[in-house]
Amino acid sequence: MSPTIIIFVLLAYFAVLFLISQYTSKNATNQSFFQANKSAPWMLVAFGMVGTSLSGVTFISVPGTVGASHFYYFQVVLGYFIGYFIVAFVLLPLYYKYNLTSIYTYLQHRFGFSSYKTGASLFIISRTLGATLRLYLVINVLQLFVIDQWHVPFWLTSMVILLMIILYTFKGGVKTIVWTDTLQTLFMLLALIICVLYIVSEMNLSLSDAWSSMKASGHLDIFNFDVNDKKFFLKQIIGGAFITVSMTGLDQEMMQKNISVKTLGDSQKNMITFSAIMVFVNFIFLFLGGMLTMYATSLGMDVKGDDLFPTIAMNVLPGLIGLVFIVGLISALFPSADGAITALTASFCIDILGMNRNNDMDEASKSTLRKKIHLAFSGLFLLMVLFFKWLDNKEVVSILLDIASYTYGPLLGLFAFGILTQRKINDSIAPIICVIAPAMAFALDKNSALLLGGYKFGFEMLAINGLITFLGLMLISKKTDGASAVIDTTTAFK
C-alpha cells in the first residue's frame, strides 16, 4: 500500500481526535484537566480504559507470544481479573472516601509528607520509563514499516506524533481523554476483529475449524504445571493479580479516569465491566496469535515474536488489511501515551509542586503552570524515545522494563501497610525503605535459582517486592491508639 494513503489516513484519524478535543475542552478548568469535573460517564471510562491498558506493545507482542508460549499468557489475564475486583472493592472506596485528586495523597493522610512524596515519585519514575518504552517500540514499528519509505528521520516522526498528542490533550486533559480513548479503543478492537476474520478466511477455515487446528498444534495449552518454570500457573495468576493491583489500582494514570466518575458505585461498575472486556479482548489477541503462527508456518515464513503480526500484516496481507493494522496500532499507541503525559502532569503539579496546597496562586496561574509542566513532560518523552532508539538493543529495553516494574513494589507495600494495619511509621525513614526493598528483591531474583534449588521467580516478584517493603515499614513502625486505618468493608461494597 502506498505510504501516501497511509499518511493521509493517519492525518484524518488525528483530525477526528483534534475535533473531539476542541469540543470536550470548551470552558475547561484545572479540575477538568485533572478529574473531568467528576462527571465522566462510567461506561465510556470502562471502554476507554481497555485501550490504555493494552497499549501498542500488547497489540504487537501478545500475538507474537503464542508460537513459543502457547496461551500461557492467559494465566496472567486470569490474575488480572482477580486483581480488578480488589481494585474495585478495596482501593476505589478508599479514594472516594478521601475525595482524592491524586491517589498518593492517601499516603499523606495515613503516614505523612515523606511517604506521600515517595509514592508520587515512584509513580513518576515508573510511568515515565514504561510509557516512553511503549511509545518507542510502537513508533519504531511505524518507522520501519511505513515512515522509512518517505526517508523521514526517526526523530522527526517521534516529534510529530508527540506534537499530535499535545494538541489534543493540552487543554482538556482527562475530560478529553475519556472520549478520545473510547474512540481509539473502538478502532483498535475493530482492527483486531477484522484481522482475525481475514486470516481465518484466508486459511479457508471456519472459527471452529481454526480452534481445532490450534488445539491439534498444541497452541491452545493454557496452564503450565512446572513449578520451577516462570510460567507456572500459580505464579502467573498470583503475579497477574498483583500486577493489576499495583499497575492499575496504584497508578495515577489509570485511577484518575476511575475517580473522574461521579459516584463510587458507578466507578465500581466501570472497573468490573472493564475487567470482563479485558479478559475477552486478551483472549482474542491470543487467538489471533495462534492463527498468525499457523499462517506463517503454512507460507514457510520464519518469523516470530514481535515481528510476527507487523510482518504478515504489512508484507503478506492485502494493502487494505495492512491499513487496518496501522489504524489499530495507532489506536493502541495514542491512549498509552496521552493518558501517561496527562497523569504525570497531574501528579507533578499536585504531588510534587503542591498546586492544591498553594492558596496564593489563582486559577489562571495554576493553569499556566500546568501547561508548562505538560509541555515539559512531552519534551521528556521525546528525549526518552530518542534515547531508547539510540540504545537499539532489545535486551536493554527488557532490562529497563524490569527495573520499571520494581518501582511498583514499594507502592504496593506502602498502600498495603496503610490499609491492613493501624500502626504509625517513622515517616522520614519511609523513602529509605522504598529504596532498599526493590534492591533486595532484585538481588533475590537474580540468585533465586542458586538459593532456592532451581526455583525462578516470575511475575510474583512484584508481590515479593511489596512484602519486603511491608516488613521494612513494620520495623520502623509502632502501635497507635488512633482511629483504625483499616478500610471499613461495609462501605467498600456500597
Image (cartoon, grey):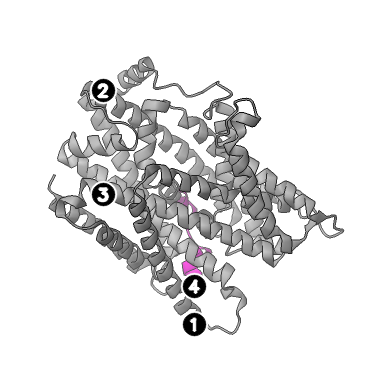
Q: For the point 45% across and 47% down, which residue is it?
A: 53
Closer to viewer: mark 4 or mark 1: 1
- Label 2 SS: helix
By secondary structure, the bulk of the magenta-drawn segment is best described as helix
Q: Secondary structure at mark 1?
A: helix
Residue at image position (33%, 53%) is 389
Query: Any mark on residue 365, and which?
Result: 1
**Label at residue 156:** none
Q: Which residue is mark 2?
A: 297
- Residue 346 in magenta? no
Looking at the image, can residue 63 be seen?
yes
Magenta residues span 30-46
Mark 4 lies on residue:
30
Q: Tell me residue 323's x, y (percent).
A: 21, 44
Q: Position of residue 424 (x, y in %)?
A: 79, 58
- Label 2 near label 1: C-beta < 8 Å? no
Q: Residue at x 57, y 61 (%)?
A: 121
First reached walking from the N terminus: tag 4 or tag 2: 4
Query: How far, Cα to Cα, is label 1 from label 2?
Result: 60 Å
Q: Which residue is mark 3?
A: 142
Q: Amino acid at mark 1?
A: Ser
